[in-house]
Amino acid sequence: MSVQSFVEERRDAFIAMRRDFHMYPEPGWLEYRSAAKVAARLIELGYDVAIGADVLDLDSRMGLPGDEIMKAAMNRAVEEGADPELVEKMGYGKTAIVATMKFDDDGPTVAFRADMDSNDVIESNEAGHIPADKGFRSRHDKAMHACGHDTHMTMGLGLAEYVATHKKTFKGTIKLIFQPAEEGVRGAKAMAEAGVVDDVDLMFGMHIGFNEKLSNCFACSDHGFLATTKLDAVFHGYSAHAGGSPEKAQNAMLAGCTAVLNLQAIARHSQGASRMNVGVFESGTGRNVTPDVAVLKLETRGATTEINDYMINRAKTIIKAAAEMHDCTYEITKQGETPAGRISDELALEVQKIIEPLGIFKEVPFDYSGGGSEDCAYFLNRVIDNGGKATYMVLGSAIKAPHHNPLFDIDEEDMLNGIIALGAIAEYYLKC
Amino acid sequence: MSVQSFVEERRDAFIAMRRDFHMYPEPGWLEYRSAAKVAARLIELGYDVAIGADVLDLDSRMGLPGDEIMKAAMNRAVEEGADPELVEKMGYGKTAIVATMKFDDDGPTVAFRADMDSNDVIESNEAGHIPADKGFRSRHDKAMHACGHDTHMTMGLGLAEYVATHKKTFKGTIKLIFQPAEEGVRGAKAMAEAGVVDDVDLMFGMHIGFNEKLSNCFACSDHGFLATTKLDAVFHGYSAHAGGSPEKAQNAMLAGCTAVLNLQAIARHSQGASRMNVGVFESGTGRNVTPDVAVLKLETRGATTEINDYMINRAKTIIKAAAEMHDCTYEITKQGETPAGRISDELALEVQKIIEPLGIFKEVPFDYSGGGSEDCAYFLNRVIDNGGKATYMVLGSAIKAPHHNPLFDIDEEDMLNGIIALGAIAEYYLKC
Amino acid sequence: MSVQSFVEERRDAFIAMRRDFHMYPEPGWLEYRSAAKVAARLIELGYDVAIGADVLDLDSRMGLPGDEIMKAAMNRAVEEGADPELVEKMGYGKTAIVATMKFDDDGPTVAFRADMDSNDVIESNEAGHIPADKGFRSRHDKAMHACGHDTHMTMGLGLAEYVATHKKTFKGTIKLIFQPAEEGVRGAKAMAEAGVVDDVDLMFGMHIGFNEKLSNCFACSDHGFLATTKLDAVFHGYSAHAGGSPEKAQNAMLAGCTAVLNLQAIARHSQGASRMNVGVFESGTGRNVTPDVAVLKLETRGATTEINDYMINRAKTIIKAAAEMHDCTYEITKQGETPAGRISDELALEVQKIIEPLGIFKEVPFDYSGGGSEDCAYFLNRVIDNGGKATYMVLGSAIKAPHHNPLFDIDEEDMLNGIIALGAIAEYYLKC
Amino acid sequence: MSVQSFVEERRDAFIAMRRDFHMYPEPGWLEYRSAAKVAARLIELGYDVAIGADVLDLDSRMGLPGDEIMKAAMNRAVEEGADPELVEKMGYGKTAIVATMKFDDDGPTVAFRADMDSNDVIESNEAGHIPADKGFRSRHDKAMHACGHDTHMTMGLGLAEYVATHKKTFKGTIKLIFQPAEEGVRGAKAMAEAGVVDDVDLMFGMHIGFNEKLSNCFACSDHGFLATTKLDAVFHGYSAHAGGSPEKAQNAMLAGCTAVLNLQAIARHSQGASRMNVGVFESGTGRNVTPDVAVLKLETRGATTEINDYMINRAKTIIKAAAEMHDCTYEITKQGETPAGRISDELALEVQKIIEPLGIFKEVPFDYSGGGSEDCAYFLNRVIDNGGKATYMVLGSAIKAPHHNPLFDIDEEDMLNGIIALGAIAEYYLKC
C-alpha cells in the first residue's frame, strides 16, 4: 500500500492519537505518560526500543526539575494510563526513547527525530479554539502543547507503523528518536552525547507550524536556527518593614527590574540577529515587606555562537552590577543551551525532489528560516561531523496564533501530510 | 489575686498558648483556627461572644481571598482542631470576634483590641531562631506570625481570663475585639462600620515589638501612624515567541519593571514622611515566551492623608503610563486602606501614670512613633469622634529581626508583662 | 533717626541698589561685580574691609569653576562697572568680604551674614514678571537671582549704612559677612575655617522668601535645615557607530539613565527627611554615535548627618554599579557640603521679643522650617561651639514662584522691612 | 597619461588637500569653507558649477541649524580663506554644489557624489593619532572629519582634475555632486528633489573606511543600507526647589531617562536588522533645581522601511508615555530621514570587472554590507526609478577606530587608490 493510502486509511486513528497526546501535555523531563505511550506502541510494532539511561549521557542533561516534581509526574502518568513498568524504567529525568528496526546490512541508517515535551502555557478556553470546542483541551494545569510536539510524536508513530507494517520492502536500518525536553533546549545534548546518532548516515528533524505564510508548504531546510542559552538568575537581598525601616532594605526587586530593563536594552549586534527575553520574573513575599528575593528566567539567542556569547557576557555583567547596585547577592545557573544548527544543502535539495512530486503541498521551498532555536542542532551537527548528512525540515501549517501562545493550534490535515512526507523520505532511502 | 500573681501562676499556660498560635499562622480573613480557638475560650470564660456577620459590615471588608482559598482554610482549621461549628458560623470572610462582659450599669465601657492574622513569610529554620529550636516553628506553608499577632491574641485571652476570674471586683463593661486581616489594613474598617466600638468610652490598641531600643519599655501612645493604601496593579500584554517574532510582543514585564522603578522614584514630599513599596511582582509564563501579564502588589503611605493621596495619584499616573508605553492594558484595584490614627493625649498620660508604678518596664515613654500603619486607626478615630478617648500603645520587645522578617521573634517575658499592663489598665478604669 | 525713618528716607536708593544687583547676577565664586560693589560701598561707609584670601581658608573652598571661567567673569565685572583694583585683589576664587566696625571694647561682637551668588536659571521674560516688566531682568546668560541674594546684599548694605551713619549711638563691634557661593553650599566652610566668626558672640543669618504662607511674616529661627552633599559623577565609555557596530559601544548614557532612576529610587529613611536630586544630566556628542560620556550633577540631603550619609553611601554604590553594568569607568567628586545647622533657642526667643513690637509684620513665629540647606550652618555651629549664640531667621515674602524658578520674585517692601528688622536687632544688642 | 600615473604625479597635492579639509571640519549645512574651496577649484578646472538654491529644493532640507549659527559659520569660513562671494552666494542653508562638464551629445551622463560635512566629535590629541602627530588635527571646536568626508571631497576633486585635464578623450557628460549634511541624512533629499540626478544614466556613490577587514579592498556595492529616521524629543516639566518642595516637580529628567532605557529596550525585529540610538541627552539647569526640561536626540534604523517604521512607532509611543508618566508635555520633531538604498546588481558586476584588473586592491568583492545609513539612497533610488543604474561602492581602508570615534583615521594611500578607481570607472563609461 502506498503511504498516501496508508495514511488515508488510518487518519482517524492518527487524529485521535494526537488529541490524546494534546490532552496530557507534560513539560520537559516529565514526559512519562507520553514516552510510555510511545514506547509501548513501538514495542507493539516490533521495534527494538531503548529507554532512559541507555540513550542518555546523564551528566549532559540540563534544566532538570526537582525530584519531587518528577515523582509527582510519574504518579500522575500512571494514573492517566501509562504502563507503570515503563514509567519505573525511565525513573527520574530519563524520559528518552530510541526505537530501531534493522531490515538488512545493505542500506544506510536513517534517523528521524521527534520531541515530546509541552509548554508552560495555560491553554485558552475560548470558543473558536478547536481543542476547547472539541473537548481535547489540556487537562493539566499550566501545561499545553503550544508548539505542536503532540503532532511530532504522532507523526513519528505514524511513520513507525507504516515502516513496520511494510518492513519486507525495506533495507538498511531505521532509527526513531523521541527526545525529551526540547523546550529550553535541554534534552538533545544528552542523547547526542550518548551516541545515539553515531551510526547514522542520514538524519532528519522536522517541525510543524511556524506561521500562516507557510500554510500547506513544506520547507526542506531551516538555515535560520539561532544559538541560544537559557539562564536563571536569582537575587538575594534583605527584607525589612516597608513602613518602619525602608532604609534597611536590600531590595532584590529593584535589582531585578533594573536588570530586566538593561538586559532588554543590550545593544543589537551588527553581525546578525540577536535576542534577549526575560520570560519569567518573580519577586517578593508580601505587600508591606521589602522584597528580599527576585528570580529571573531568561534566554539569549544569536545568529552565531559569537553573537550568542556576546549576549551572555553582557547579560552576566548586567546581572552582577544590578545585584551590587542594591547590595544584593546573586547567582546565575545555566538551564539549557544549543549551538546554531548546520544543514547539508545537498540532502535538502534531494528532499525537495522527493516531496514536490507528491503533489500534496502548495509549495516546497528549499529553505525556511524561522528564527527559533532547536537542540536538534546537536544531532544534525554530530551526524555531519561524522561524515553523514542532515537536514531539518519545516512542515508549514496555518497556525491560529504564534507558537507558545494560549491559542496556538495546527491544522490536523497538515499533520497527516507530514506522515506521508516522512514515509516518502523513508522509502526513498530505505526501499529495497 | 493581683494581676502580677495571676500572670506568674499562669505563665506556662500563656506561653504554650502563644506557641500554639505561632505554629498555625493564618493570613488575613483566613483566621479560622485562631478565631475559633479564641472564641471557644471566651465562651468558656463566660463572655457574650458575637461572631462573624454580627460584628462586620460586609461591604466594608477589603482584600478578601477567593472562595476556594477560604474553603481550604476552613477545612484545614477543622483538621487542626478548630470547632467545626464555630468555623461554619464564621463562613467565608467573617473571621471576626467581639466578646463582651457587662459587670454593671455604672462604669464605663472599655475596649481592648487584638488582631489575629499572620504574614506571607516563610519562617526561618536556622539554628538560633527560637521557634525553630524549640519546635514551634510555623507548620503552614508561606505563612508566619512575623508581626507578633500570636502574642496579641494570647494577651487578649490572658486579660479576658484575669477579668473573668475576678469579675466580682469589676464594674462597667469590658469589650474584647479580635480583629481579622490587620495585615494589609483590610479588616478593621468593616468592624468599625458595624458599630462595634460605638458604645465604647475608652479604647485601647496595643502592639508588641518594633525594635531593640524599645526592649522592655512600654510606650503609652504612637503618634506616628501613617495613612496607607494597598493597591494591586495588573498589566495585560500579548505573548509572542521570543525568538521568532519578538516584535509582536506587548511586553507586560517591561511595563511592570518600568512602573516599579518609577514608583520607587516618586519624589519625596516636603510636608512629611511618605512611603512606597512594591512588595510582590510576578510576571511571565515561560522563558521563551514574551511575558503577557505582570502583577504588582504595592502600598503607599503618608504622614497625612494628603501625602498618602499624593503618593496614590502619582502611582496611578505611573502605572497608566507604563502600560501605555508597552501597548498593554491594565487595571488597578484597592486591597486595603487606613487613615492616620488619632490619639487622646490625656488618656496616654493617664496610661503612663498607671504603668510606671508597676515597676516592670525599664522605661515608660509617653510616645513612640514606629512609622507603621494600623487600621486600629478606624477604632481610635471612631471612638474619639463619638466623644470617647483612645490610645494605641507599644509594648517594646527586643526583637531579633525586623517585623515581617523570617527571623522575627519576640521575648515571651515581654508578652507576659503585656498581660500585666493590660490587666492594670482594666483595673484602673473598671475596678469597683 | 529711628531705623524705620531711615529706611523710609532711603527706600528708593535701596530698591535701585537691589535692582542693580538683580540685573548682574553672578554664580558662586564669580561674584566679582557684586562683591566689588559691596566692598566699595562698605569702604565708603568707613568699615574695615577684609577681602579675599584674608577671610578664606583656601583649601576649604568647594566647587570652584575653572580658571578661564573666572578670568572671563573678572573681565566682565570690570566692563560692567566694578572697581578693577578690588576685582584684581579678589583674584581667582576669592570673592569673600568681611566688614568690621568697632565702636568700643565694652559691647559684644555681633555678626550678620549675607550671601551674594546667583542661580543657573534663565530668568523669565514673560509679561507680569516684574523684573521683565520694569526692565531690570538679568542681563547675564543663564544666570538669575532666583533665590533673593540680591536683596540679601542690599539688606546687608542697608544695615551697614544705618549703623555707620549712627555709630555714635553704638557700642561693641559689628561684623558684616558677605559670603560667596552659598548655592551649592560651597563658600561658607572656607570663611568659617578662616576664623571670621571666632570672635563673634551673637551670629545672625537670614533668608528672604520661602513661600506665600509666610508673606509679611518674620520667623525667628529655622530648625529645619537639611544636611547636604553636592556630587558630580562622570561616566566614561566608548563611542561606536550606532548603525555599523552598536555592539562595540560602552554606553555611558545608559549607565547614567540607570543611575538616575535608581538614585531617585533610593529608599526613604524612617528616621527623618531625606532628599535626592539629579539636577543636571548631559550625555553624548552626536545622534549617530553611541554616547561615550555622561555627566551627572546631583545632591543628597538629610534631616541629620546620618541620613545624609546614608543617601551618599547608597548613591556611590549605585553610581559604581551603573558604570560597571555598561562597562564604563567613572569618577565622583564632591562639589559642596554642609551639615545641618544648630539654633540657639533663647536667642530666637529674644529676636521674637525684638521684632514683634515693631508692628511691621503680620506674624512673628518662633520657627519656620523650610526644608532647604544652608552653609550658614558652618557659621552658626562654630559660634555655638565657641560658646556664643546663633540663629537663622526667615523674612517671609509673597514669592511668585518657588525659589530657583525662572519666575521667582520677591516683594521689595519685604526687603525694606528686613532692613528695619536687622537694624532693630543691631540696636538691641549694640545700642549704648 | 593613465589615471595611475596622474595620481602618482599629484599625490602630494591630493594629500595636502585632504589635510587642509581635515583641519577645517564643518558640520552639516555649515560647509561654507569646504564648499567654497570645492567650487573655486571646479570653476578653475572649467566646470559649469551650480551652487546653492539652484541645486536644492529648499523645502526638502532637514535639520537646519539656526540662523545665528549659520552666520557665524559663514564669517569663520571667510576668515579661514573661503571666497567671500561664493560664501555669500550660498547663504543660509545652501551649501550644495553640482559641477557639470559636457564632452559631447553621444555618451551617457555619469554622476559621482561626494559629501562634505563633518561630525560633532572632539578629535583626539593622543600621540599616535596621525592628524595630531602631523599637525593637521581639527582646528574647530567639537568638530572632526571622523567619517572620511575630507577624503571624499579630495577624491571628487581628484577625479574632476583628471577628467578636466584629459577632456579631449571623453564623450558624454560627467556630473560631480558635492552634497551637504550627509550626517543626519539631511541633505541629499533636497538635492534629489531639485532634480540634479534626473538626467543621470549611471550614478556612483562611494564611501571610504568601514573596518579593518576591508583594508585595501574595494567593494562594488553595499546592499546593507539601513533606512533611518532622526528625531528630536523634548520634555517640558516644572522645576521646583529640590530640598523645599520636591513633590511639586514635574521631573523632565526622569521622563527622559525612562524613555532612554525603554527606547533601547524596544524588541528586536524578526524580519531584519533594527537600530536605536539616543545619541544626545541634556537635562536640567542646576543641581538643586528639579529638572524642567530634557532634550533627546535619537535615531531609528531598519533593514527595511517597515522595520524602521516599527522602530519609529514604538519610539513615539514610549516618548509620549514617558512624558505622561512624569506629568510633562513633550514634542517630537523629525531632523532627518532616508529610505534604504537600492543597487543595480549588473552595474556593480561591471564595476567589479573594471576595478579588479587595476591590480591595486587586495580584493574586489561584489558586496560589502556595512550596516550604516546613507541618504545617497535618494540619488540611487531616483536614478533607478528613472530607468538608470546606480551603485554605492565601499573603498576599504584600515581605519584606526570606528567611524565617528575621536581616533578615526584612514590610510591616505587608500584615498589615492580611490581616485584611480573613480578615474577608471569614468574612463570605462565616458572614454571616446
Image: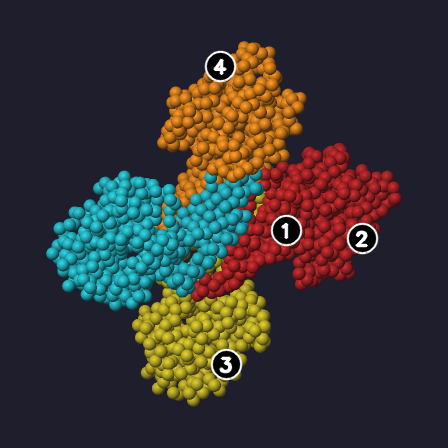
Chain colours: A red, B yellow, C cyan, D orange
Q: Tell me, yes or no, whether the two marked residues, 4 and 2, touch with CB atoms within 8 Å.
A: no
Q: Dot 2: within a 10 Å radius of its alpha carbon, few (fewer than 14), some, or many (20 or more) residues? A: some
Q: Amino acid at mark 3?
A: Phe
Tell which of C156 and A347 is nearer to you: C156
Q: Position of residue A46 (x, y in %)?
A: 83, 51
Is there one chain holding both mark 1 and mark 3? no
Give me the C-alpha separation between circle 2 and circle 3: 66 Å
Front of the two marks 1 and 4: 4
- Which circle's residue, 1 or 2, is located before the other in the chain? 2
Front of the two marks 2 and 3: 3
Q: Amino acid at mark 1?
A: Lys
Tell which of C148 and B350 is nearer to you: C148
Q: Residue furthest right?
A: A105
Please give the chain letter of the residue carrying mark 1: A
Q: Which residue is mark 2?
A: A49
Is there one chain holding both mark 1 and mark 2? yes
Please give the chain letter of the residue carrying mark 3: B
Please give the chain letter of the residue carrying mark 2: A
Q: Tell me, yes or no, whether the two marked residues, 1 and 2, touch with CB atoms within 8 Å.
A: no
Q: Amino acid at mark 4?
A: Gly
Name which residue lies at 25% across and 51% down: C153
Give me the C-alpha separation between circle 1 and circle 3: 53 Å
Q: Which residue is mark 3?
A: B14
| Residue C41 position (above or below residue B53) | above
Q: Which residue is mark 4?
A: D46
Q: Regarding mark 4 in the picture, which secondary structure is present there?
A: loop
Front of the two marks 4 and 3: 4
Give me the C-alpha separation between circle 1 and circle 2: 31 Å
Q: Amino acid at mark 2?
A: Val
Q: Regarding mark 1 in the picture, which secondary structure is present there?
A: strand
Q: Quadrant of residue A366?
A: top right
Q: Which residue is mark 1?
A: A230
